[in-house]
Amino acid sequence: MATFHIIGLFKVDISRESLALAAQQYEWADDWLTDTGDLTDEIWNWYIGERSEEMMTIALVEAQIKGNFSKNELLNMAHGESDQAPYLEFYLNGAGTEIISYEAAVKAEDRRICFFLHFVHPLEPIRIMQGKKIVEKLVLPNLTTPPERLRPHIHYLPYD
C-alpha cells in the first residue's frame, strides 16, 4: 500500500478561456469547442448556470506517493460530506518537475500525483478508507496559488 503526503492545495481559477484550453487537452471534450477552438456558448452557459457553486470550490491537490501504488487506491479516498473523490489525476516525477505516465508512476519508487477535488473544505482532511473504516486522514494545507511549475498542467474540465 502506498503512503501519501500532501504537498499543496491550490486554488483553481475557472474561466471560459481555461475551459477551452482544457477541452483541447482531452479528446472526450472536443465537442465542447467551436471550429475556432473557443468554448461553445452552450457549454459555458451550462457551466456558469449549473456549476457556479462548484466553480468557487475547486482545488488541485499535489501529493508525494511512496511505496507500491495502484490507481485503485484513489478509489479509497474521500473528502467532505459528499465524499468527493480525486478527479482528472496526473502524475509527476518525484521532484514534481515533469509529467510522467501512469505506467511510469507505478514503476517509480518516488513520484507525485495531482488531482482535482470539488467542494473543497480545507479544514476537512482527505480520508483513506477500507470499506467503511477510515484508515488514514491526510490533513490539507492552506489553500494557495499554484506554483509556476504546475500551471501549464492545470487542465480542469467539469464532469457532467
Image: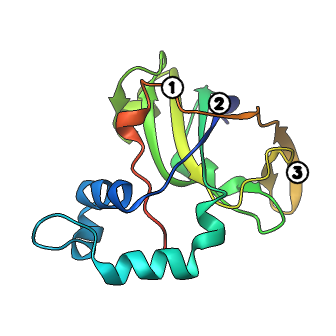
Query: Residue lying furthest left in this view?
Result: 35
Q: Which-is-in-front pick, marks 1 and 2? A: 1
- State whether residue 32 is above or below residue 99: below
Q: Which-is-in-front pick, marks 3 and 2? A: 2
- State whether residue 95 is above or below residue 49: above
Which is nearer the N-term, disc 1 or disc 3?
3
Three-letter amino acid code of the residue under disc 1:
Pro
Q: Quadrant of residue 9?
A: top right
Indicate which disc residue 8 carries: 2
Three-letter amino acid code of the residue under disc 3:
Ile
Q: In percent of the image, x 53 and y 32: which residue is there?
A: 146
Image location (x, y in percent) of residue 15: 43, 58
* Circle 3 SS class: strand
One can see residue 160 in this view? no
Three-letter amino acid code of the residue under disc 2:
Gly
Quarter of the figure with the N terminus: top right
